[in-house]
Amino acid sequence: MIAIMLALCTGLAFCACGAKEKEVVEKETALTTVGFSQIGAESDWRLASTSSMQASFNATMGYRLVYDDGQQKQENQLKAMREFIDSEVDYIVLDPITELGWDATLMEAKEAGIPVILVDRQVSVEDDSVYTAWVGSDFLLEGQRACAWLEAYLSSISYEGEVNIAHIQGTTGSSAQIGRSDALEEAAEQMGWNIVAQEDADFVQAKGREVMESMLEECGDLINVVYCENDSEALGAIEAIENYGKTPGSNIAEGEIMVISFDATEDGLRQTLAGKIALDTECNPNYGTVAEKLISSLKKGEIVPHEYYMEESQFSGLSEVNTITVDGKTYDVTMVTDAIIAGRNY
Ligand code: GYE
């Protein structure tokens, strides 16, 4: 009898203890679900940004990441957002392809009580409270830095000829395109530079090549600077310039075509080291850690900043310009080396 009682007791004790253990384990494994609507996979920069998100939002970090590739279409991103809302994810991270057209869906997320963190690009909405925070780059400043470098470089070599720019744009209506294009158009007006051709190549290498080919066909003898809004386009433009029989380089007085680019990816910096890209302005895709910190603060009920700007630099293989100034603030231009390229993670 005693034995039976003991057995029962230990059995009960065991059961109770097991339930507690189970509860603890469940609590520990309760992952926070984050729906991530990515734009696509159009460039190396984009792949790096996806990796950064995946590295920060995984089970080890306490998250279940539901990744959706929008394949460069806003309608796909809107569909993904709706699915995230319907499936009641805990948080949404959205990289919006273009700025317009998000009001209704973001309002739905807000009404469903799902905080939205925007990464990289921004949205243009009537009510900013439809998203909780944004982390990304100052695209206008990136463009202004590139233009300030061009101005400083041309004056350092005492270049006094015409500056005829082929402008290969990123996806029309995206924040990165708007900021970088505005900066160039403003500088061109101030400096008397001519924008002799302007076209969207969607941040894609093959399109960058095609657009450059048609620009060279139309005004190849005129163009001496190409302002590409990302490295993928620049790589395509370089191919087209070389196929056309011209040399991508900084000696524009002697007929070379100077390529200016954005992102500072590994391939972009290799071309910068080789002298085919004159200046590569960095755009930092490593916002996964910042987005994760924001979400972990929100989980604790803390207030987070509405905007967070990433730190960025610029690289050149030319030694003439070491610093540039924009709006009274001075920025270093880093001389690119093999060691610098090896030390970077994208
Ligand atoms: O420059 C480009 C990418 O939005 C900043 O998108 C991003 C841009 C980046 O495809 O490579």
Image (cartoon, rainbow, N blue to C red):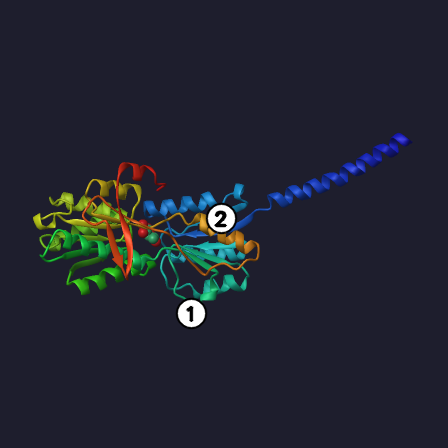
**To which residue does mark 2 refer?**
66
| Left or right of 122 on screen, residue 13 | right
Amino acid beneath label 2? Val
**Identity of the residue drawn at 51% across and 58% down:** 115
Q: Is residue 80 toward the left or the right of residue 227 in the image? A: right
Q: Quadrant of residue 246?
A: top left
Element at badge 1? loop
Residue 153 seen in this snapshot: yes
Q: Give percent across and percent down for residue 274.
A: 20, 40
**Tag 2 and tag 1, C-beta contact below 8 Å:** no
Residue 55, quarter of the rendered image: top left
Q: Residue at x 60, y 46 (%)?
A: 30
Query: Disc number at residue 215?
Result: none
Residue placed most toward the observer, 73 or 260: 260
Residue drawn at point x = 13 percent, y = 44 percent: 247
Mark 1: C-beta under 8 Å from nearest atom of ligand 1: no
Give the left or right position of residue 52, taking residue 108 as reference.
Answer: left
Location of residue 9 with respect to 229 vertically, above or below: above
